[in-house]
Image: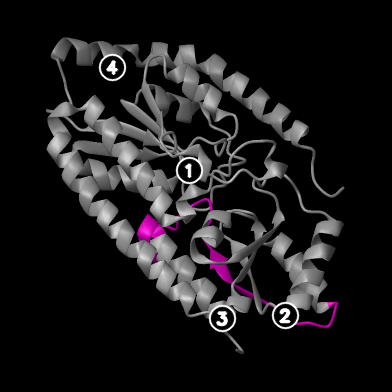
């Protein structure tokens, strides 16, 4: 089978969502005493940190930078976790139910969790960081059933708009912290502007015919559009689809024809797909290296270079340029 039917994926995700939605009232009841304590004591963002729950690490990084000392950030999806296939636990629902604010990506990145966020939104402030991005500049691959490509963080200039969204939501929730959020966001967005220029400079060191990124799934299309790369993936936009023999064969022939020197493994996707592709290319008499690990849907370990969004992007562009520049 070339790819698992989307309908199967949606049904499985829906079943998970329904079970989680049914947990929400129970979790709220368990959190009611804490809510009552805050109401009685008059706790406010001015006297205690704001409890923020996020989904992916890239959003956690924005919130930590913009919120500074005024927030405590809990991320649900750590290093190596694939958000497309992520299934929230009862503990996750409890953490979200007791949060002051929940930030998520949206654009169907978190599968059917949007329905859980909608249910939680009746009691907790929830916000999609991509909500204010102009839909006309988002990618909408036809194979993704009319939805937008959610991997917007790979265009650094586009991801800056997510930082603006976080800033505005934080100010709305905690007006007393306006100056802090505005100052922090200004510095962070300036750093992202510098990063955007850095990635463009690094990409420009590669000849155009070498600017081809082959990965397990199509997470890098925004990166390709922003920085001049052709992008090919074995799987579609979501890792819920599976690559089959025909996909491997077609991509192997493309690699041989274009003499692409390296393909890449993603830290949140099993390497077997790229290893199968490498073997298929070698069977056709051409050697292609695995150029290294790219951080696609998750950042690296907290103490590593890729443990921040900026570090993750820098690590990726270093890996890509170094691997594709070999044997020029």
The structure residue drawn at horizontal position 48% and vertical position 80%, both measured from the top left corner, is 205
Mark before the other along the chain sequence, 3 or 1: 1
C-alpha distance separating marks 3 and 2: 13 Å
Q: Nearer the viewer, mark 3 or mark 2?
A: 3
Q: Nearer the viewer, mark 3 or mark 4?
A: 3
The structure residue drawn at horizontal position 54% and vertical position 66%, both measured from the top left corner, is 228
Q: Nearer the viewer, mark 4 or mark 2?
A: 2
Identify the secondary structure beneath mark 3.
loop
Task: Report x, y in % for residue 267.
Answer: 56, 59
Q: Quadrant of residue 256?
A: bottom right
Mark before the other along the chain sequence, 4 or 2: 4
C-alpha distance separating marks 4 and 1: 25 Å
Farthest residue to the front: give it. Answer: 136
Q: In the drawing, what numbered circle is on residue 34?
A: 4
Q: In the drawing, what numbered circle is on residue 207?
A: 3
> Decide: marks 4, 1 in contact (CB < 8 A)?
no
Disc 2: which residue: 259
Task: Report x, y in % for residue 44.
Answer: 16, 22
The structure residue drawn at horizontal position 80% and vertical position 46%, both measured from the top left corner, is 3
Is 181 rendered above or below residue 234?
above
Q: Which residues are magenta?
A: 283-310
Identify the secondary structure beneath mark 1.
loop
Q: In the drawing, what numbered circle is on residue 77?
A: 1
Q: Nearer the viewer, residue 155 or 112?
A: 155
* Magenta residue check for 297: yes
Crowding at mark 2 (Cα within 10 Å: few <14, some 14-19, many 20+):
some
Mark before the other along the chain sequence, 3 or 4: 4
Identify the secondary structure beneath mark 4.
helix
Mark before the other along the chain sequence, 4 or 1: 4
Q: Nearer the viewer, residue 207 or 289?
A: 207
């Amino acid at each position: 089978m070339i790819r698992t039917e989307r309908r199967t994926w949606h049904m499985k995700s829906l079943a998970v969502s329904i079970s989680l939605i049914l947990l929400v009232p129970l979790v709220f009841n368990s959190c009611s005493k804490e809510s009552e304590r805050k109401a009685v004591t008059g706790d406010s963002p001015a006297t205690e940190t704001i409890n923020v729950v996020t989904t992916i690490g890239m959003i956690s990084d924005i919130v930590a930078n913009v919120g500074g000392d005024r927030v405590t950030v809990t991320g649900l999806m750590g290093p190596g976790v694939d958000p497309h296939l992520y299934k929230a636990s009862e503990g996750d629902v409890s953490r979200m139910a007791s949060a002051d604010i929940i930030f998520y990506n949206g654009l169907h990145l978190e599968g059917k969790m949007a329905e859980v966020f909608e249910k939680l939104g009746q009691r907790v402030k929830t916000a999609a960081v991509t909500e204010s991005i102009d839909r006309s500049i988002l990618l909408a691959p036809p194979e993704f059933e009319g939805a937008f490509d959610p991997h917007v963080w790979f265009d650094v200039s586009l991801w800056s708009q997510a930082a603006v969204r976080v800033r505005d939501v934080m100010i709305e929730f905690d007006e007393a912290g306006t100056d802090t959020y505005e100052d922090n966001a200004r510095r962070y967005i300036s750093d992202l502007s510098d990063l955007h220029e850095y990635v463009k400079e690094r990409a420009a060191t590669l000849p155009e015919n070498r600017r081809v990124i082959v990965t397990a799934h199509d997470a890098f299309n925004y990166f390709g559009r922003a920085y001049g790369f052709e992008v090919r993936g074995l799987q579609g936009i979501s890792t819920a689809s599976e690559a089959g023999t025909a996909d491997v064969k077609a991509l192997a022939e493309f690699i041989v024809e274009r003499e692409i020197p390296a393909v890449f493994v993603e830290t949140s996707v099993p390497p077997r797909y790229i290893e199968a592709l490498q073997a298929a290319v070698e069977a056709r008499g051409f050697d292609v290296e695995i150029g290294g690990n790219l951080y696609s849907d998750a950042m690296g370990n907290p103490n590593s270079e890729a443990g921040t969004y900026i570090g993750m992007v820098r690590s990726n562009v270093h890996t890509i340029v170094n691997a594709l520049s070999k044997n020029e």
